[in-house]
Amino acid sequence: MPQRLSTREIRRRTKQIRRAIDGTRRRLINLKFIRTAQFPYRPPSVPKGIDPLPKKSKTGSSFKTDWARRTPAQTFRMLFSEFPMRPIIQFLAKPSMIGIDSLADIPNYQPVIFVANHHSHIDTPLLLTSLPIRWRKKLVVGAAADYFFSTRITGTLSALFIGAIPIERRKITRKSSDDIADLIDKGWSFMVFPEGGRSPDGWGQPFRGGAAYLSLRCNAPIVPIHITGTGAILRKGRNLPKPSKTTINFGRPIWPGIEESSRSLAKRIEVSVAQLADETSSNWWEAKKRLYEEKTPTLHGPEASSWRRAWELSGRKRKQQSPSRNWPKI
């Protein structure tokens, strides 16, 4: 038989039911109010014929990377570059370095702008594991805002693992140049690929003047770097890497002149990287002779059809692999 409830229990349960009904009624009223509410509970309406204000983007060049330069993120990045990254790069790239002793002339705690050619995604981790420790501790890498910072996930990973900051490839905005200049003034070194993207065919592309402008503005030296062999590991359009040998050639620091223009300094930087490429493909003496005679080959390759450019590039690689003298024959 069902248990009979006392009068007290019936009153208690009746109060609970009434409270539940009243709470549901209040929630329905609030929901109806939210649906019909206007400003300031909702954004103001836009008159007809007027375009609404665009929403501020949190990706691309607007992505915030300040957190990646704090101590926890820096410590993680240093550990990551030493343990997983370095053995992987040693296995894939087998790098050999030339001219690393030329960096000894730079004073301690002097921020530097590292400028290199760009053939592959391997270029960045290769340089991060090859630079001396005193610059790797405080180093930011200029990365394409439309590629590495297109989403919050890719932007976070790029900032955390390689210390990337977003820059525009087509043109450097005033905000991005001011942000990078502030970092250099605070003692951070800056690494950038002035070609604006990876090489599509193995030859170099024209250098842009952003690095020269920052050097003149911050009075920071530029270290030219030429990288060879990374295109064979992971060229543009390939997804899986293939182990190969690489060479990193460091040039002497380039200090900006007192009244030098950014265009003149950018030209000096490109010529210096081209000389390093000529030195890597031949030898130091022959490259110096061509530089003195103003016959240093450009990074851009011949103005010809694609097959001709590929032919010239393969001949340059064969010349690099063949044994050559490092000093003139006397």
Image: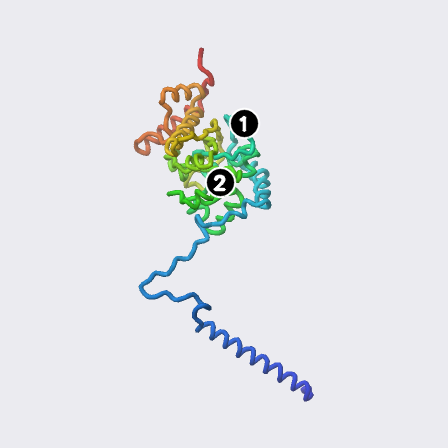
Q: Which mark is residue 190?
A: none
* Residue visible at 59% across and 82% down in the picture: 18
Kind of residue sitting beneath label 1:
Ala
Could you tell which of marks 2 and 1 lies nearer the N-terminus?
A: 1
Kind of residue sitting beneath label 2:
Val
Residue 317 percent coordinates (x, y): 41, 27
Count the labels in the image: 2
Residue 262 percent coordinates (x, y): 39, 34
Can residue 142 be seen by looking at this rendering? yes
Secondary structure of residue under mark 1:
helix
Would you identify the image quadrant in which residue 115 lies? top left
Rendering colour mode: rainbow
* Residue visible at 43% across and 40% down in the picture: 238
| Quadrant of the snapshot with the C terminus | top left
Q: Which mark is residue 104?
A: 1
| Quadrant of the snapshot with the N terminus | bottom right
Label 2 Cα crowd, 10 Å radius (few <14 / some 14-19 / many 20+): many
Residue 158 percent coordinates (x, y): 50, 45
Secondary structure of residue under mark 2:
strand
Question: Going by the image, does 319 lie left or right of 138?
Answer: left
Q: CA distance from mark 2 to mark 1?
A: 22 Å
**Towards the viewer: 204 or 271:** 271
Label 1 Cα crowd, 10 Å radius (few <14 / some 14-19 / many 20+): few
Q: Nearer the viewer, mark 2 or mark 1?
A: 1
* Residue visible at 53% across and 75% down in the picture: 27
**Towards the viewer: 301 or 173:** 173
**Towards the viewer: 256 or 15:** 256
Q: Which residue is mark 2?
A: 141
Residue ranking furthest to the top: 330
